[in-house]
Image (tube, helix red, strand yellow):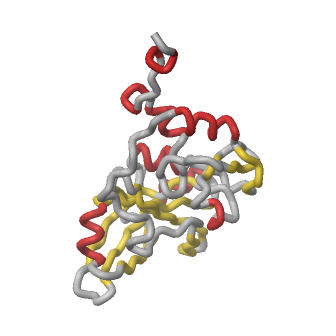
């Protein structure tokens, strides 16, 4: 039996952890060479790298160093292809690659959003920059509306998360505002306008 027949690298046999390792933390698509990494070893894909000034996972500097081990893995594995009808990451013009800053109650918060083109899910998360124990004191809401103003939707999010929480783990657990892509697209019409507001719940959040 040939070696490639004995150990086929089919998508069905590839563990989820391996697939996750090859998923770009920015666009959430599978990375292909060249793959570069930050000083902590986190990687981003070649399409997203030019847009980044710091690592989206740990905020440390991105280096010009290639992650050859991950590149080899990407070449060897046959990962599931991107669906033909998957949305483009820029189709709603709402996918910043760097966190945005919110100032509220004399505090600093960061929010960012991602469009997972394979799962067709839109994520929005707000993180608190300060003592970890204070993060749960705040919640956030997201207002989405079309460019014409005819469509509008408000979503109450979870409590704010601490700045040092792994953003990819947050997305994986769904511990943030998670919206179906088609729902967001219906609200957007031709253009989506959004706003994020941080507030203190009337009842303390445990």
Q: Is residue 17 above or below residue 151?
A: above
Q: Quadrant of residue 55?
A: bottom right
Q: Quadrant of residue 109?
A: bottom right
Q: Position of residue 122 (x, y in %)?
A: 37, 60
The residue located at (31%, 67%) in the rendering is 155
Give the quadrant of the N terminus: top left
Numbered circles on residues, count: 0
The residue located at (46%, 14%) in the rendering is 6
202 or 66, which lies in front? 66
Q: Is residue 152 above or below residue 15?
A: below
Which residue extends farthest bottom? 148
Which residue extends farthest front? 2
The residue located at (53%, 57%) in the rendering is 26
Q: Position of residue 80 (x, y in %)?
A: 39, 41
Q: Is residue 49 left or right of residue 144?
A: right
Q: Is residue 187 left or right of residue 59?
A: left
Which residue extends farthest top? 1
175 or 55, which lies in front? 55
The residue located at (62%, 47%) in the rendering is 33
135 or 37, which lies in front? 37
Q: Is residue 101 left or right of residue 156?
A: right
Q: Position of residue 35 (x, y in %)?
A: 65, 48
42 or 177, which lies in front? 42
Q: Is residue 190 above or below residue 16?
A: below
């Amino acid at each position: 039996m040939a070696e490639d027949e004995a150990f086929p690298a089919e998508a069905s046999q590839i563990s989820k952890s391996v697939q996750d390792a090859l998923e770009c933390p920015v666009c959430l698509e599978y990375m292909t060479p060249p793959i570069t990494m930050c000083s902590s070893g986190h990687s981003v894909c070649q399409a997203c790298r030019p847009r980044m000034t710091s690592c989206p996972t740990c905020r440390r500097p991105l280096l010009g160093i290639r992650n050859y081990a991950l590149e080899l893995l990407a070449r060897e594995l046959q990962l599931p292809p991107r669906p033909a009808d998957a949305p483009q990451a820029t189709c709603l013009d709402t996918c910043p690659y760097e966190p945005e800053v919110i100032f509220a109650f004399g505090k600093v918060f960061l929010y960012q959003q991602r469009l997972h083109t394979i799962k067709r899910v839109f994520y929005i998360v707000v993180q608190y920059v300060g003592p970890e124990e204070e993060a749960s004191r705040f919640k956030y809401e997201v207002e989405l509306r079309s460019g014409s103003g005819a469509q509008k939707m408000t979503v109450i999010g979870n409590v704010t998360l601490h700045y040092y929480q792994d953003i990819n783990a947050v997305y994986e657990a769904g511990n943030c505002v998670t919206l179906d892509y088609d729902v967001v697209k219906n609200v957007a019409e031709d253009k989506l306008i959004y706003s994020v507001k941080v507030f203190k719940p009337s009842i303390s959040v445990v």
